[in-house]
Image (spheres, grey):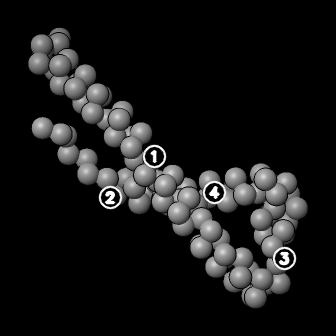
Amino acid sequence: MQVAGQACYASRAMRFALPSIAQMALMAAIVTTALYLPAGTILVLLASALFGVSLLGFITFGGFLTPFEGVLAWWAIFFLPALVYAAYAMPWSAPE
């Protein structure tokens, strides 16, 4: 049994949620891109100093990936915590 007000509330919630998810993903992508070079540099320097890993070996996961794929994989790895941050920092209240 459907109440008339429920259908309106559900569609209104979906209209609010979908753009919010897109904004959250965009915010995470911006944060990832901004922090990619500095955080990656620190990780490479630490891996090189502590474990003797070369830059190419670090980027390509020991030669498992091509350099281009490695850069994309590292970006995706950095994207996951940025997405969690964006979900936490995103204002989830509906606009009035």
**For this view, does 69 lie left or right of residue 12?**
right
The residue at the point 67 percent across, 60 percent down is 74
- Please give the label number shown on residue 25: 1
The one nearer the camera, 89 or 30, is: 30
Tags 4 and 1 touching, CB below 8 Å: no
Report the Cα–Cα distance between label 1 and label 2: 12 Å
* Residue 22, image x, y percentages: 42, 39
Report the Cα–Cα distance between label 3 and label 1: 32 Å
The answer to whether residue 76 is above or below residue 19 is below
- The residue wearing badge 3 is 54
Q: Is residue 80 at least partly visible in the picture?
A: no
First in sequence: mark 3 vs mark 2: 3
Report the Cα–Cα distance between label 3 and label 4: 19 Å
- The residue wearing badge 2 is 89
Quarter that holds the N terminus:
top left
Tag 1, which secondary structure?
helix
Residue 43, quarter of picture:
bottom right
The residue at the point 31 percent across, 53 percent down is 90
Tag 4, which secondary structure?
helix
Report the Cα–Cα distance between label 4 and label 1: 14 Å
Q: How many residues crowd mark 4 within 10 Å: few (<14), some (14–19), many (20+)?
A: some
Q: What residue type is labelled 2?
A: Ala
**For this view, does 90 lie left or right of residue 79?**
left
- Please give the label number shown on residue 75: 4
Q: What residue type is labelled 1?
A: Ala
Report the Cα–Cα distance between label 3 and label 2: 36 Å
Tags 2 and 4 touching, CB below 8 Å: no
Tag 2, which secondary structure?
helix
Q: What residue type is labelled 4?
A: Trp
* Residue 73, image x, y percentages: 70, 54
Tags 1 and 2 touching, CB below 8 Å: no
